[in-house]
Amino acid sequence: MSKLTPEEVSQLEAEVNEKVTVLGTNPPPPPREPMSRLQKSALWIAFIAVIAGPLWLAVAALGSKFGLWSFGFGLGKMTFQWSKYVLFAGVAISAIALIIQLLKAPRRGSIFALILLMVPIMILGRMNGVGQVAAGLPPIHDVQTDWNNPIRFSDALLAEREANGWNPVLDSPVVPASAAGRWPDAVGKTNKELQAESYAKFNLRPQLLEIRPEIAFEAAIEVAKKEGMEIVSADAKTGRIHATYTSFWYGFVDDVMIQVDPQGKVGSKVNVRSVSRVGLSDLGANATRINSFIEALNFALSNR
């Protein structure tokens, strides 16, 4: 290998020195162009308008839950009627903010404006989906596993429901004429008919268990608690359990009755009835609750 001449060594050193970057010697990057007052103001106004939608819905629900207004006002007026105006205002204002960001440099606020625009649009889409689901569900709020032998509520509970103007508990309830506006084909039909038509996929039938009634009774209490219910009373002699379920939003309360009876020599039979205190349609809540309870009960007993 031939040695480099002094001239070649000097040339290489010069090339290396040209490529070496000394910390702090490079010029600072040019400052970013600041957003205009119009752009900043548009984003702030859009942010406030968009946040107003979810806050309005939360206030409507929690106000009903804590008794500031009736559930009919909170759910019917504030949620399903007036909230649309608040949400559409959020869409319009955030769309204007997005246009302002795109038309005037710098355009870095356009991503945030687009996110703001999507929030009320997604909420409106969700509300529309809930409305479509509700329209396809029956206008009933009383569901049970055996309409041929309905579970009867205690006289004290029936009197409490009547005194508070809550939904009556009948052996064979029918859809009233007041439902004709949204469910004209359902008027006059019984809960038994509509339940069979709409909730055929659910396990809404008496549960025959090869287990002693006292074991099934204790398991039913344990499962009800795990399912979010509050036990009001439990009578082991009659096999009767009264529980309530309170929804987080709006504070809707449903009365749930669980009946455990002997079946044969060593078996037991479990029936459940869930009735909303207010409202015509429960949006499938009671059927879903009973189905979930029965599945959880069968799973719990299968592991014993």
Image: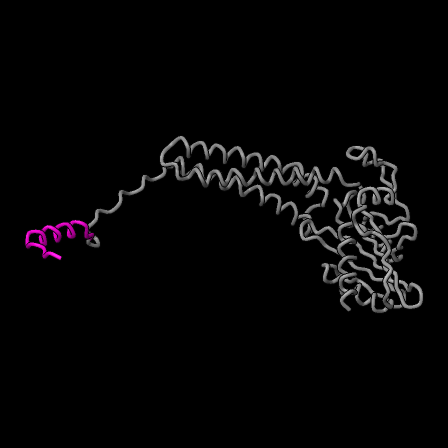
Left or right, 115 with reference to 255 = left
- In this picture, is 89 found above or below 9? above
Q: Residue furthest front?
A: 1
Which quarter of the figure has residue 273? bottom right
Which residue is at a point 93% across and 67% down the rendered structure image?
Answer: 265
- Where is residue 276 drawn, in percent x and y? 79, 49
- Where is residue 174 drawn, in percent x and y? 87, 41
Which quarter of the figure has residue 217? bottom right
Q: Is 58 in front, or is 26?
A: 26
- Where is residue 162 drawn, in percent x and y? 85, 50
* Colour mode of the rendering: one colour
Give, as a single range, the part of the protein colored magenta: 1-21
Q: Is 125 in front, or is 206?
A: 206
Q: Residue furthest left?
A: 6
Left or right, 296 with reference to 91 = right
The N terminus sits in image quarter: bottom left
Q: Is 245 one of the magenta-colored residues?
A: no
Which residue is at a point 74% across and 44% down the rendered structure image?
Answer: 283
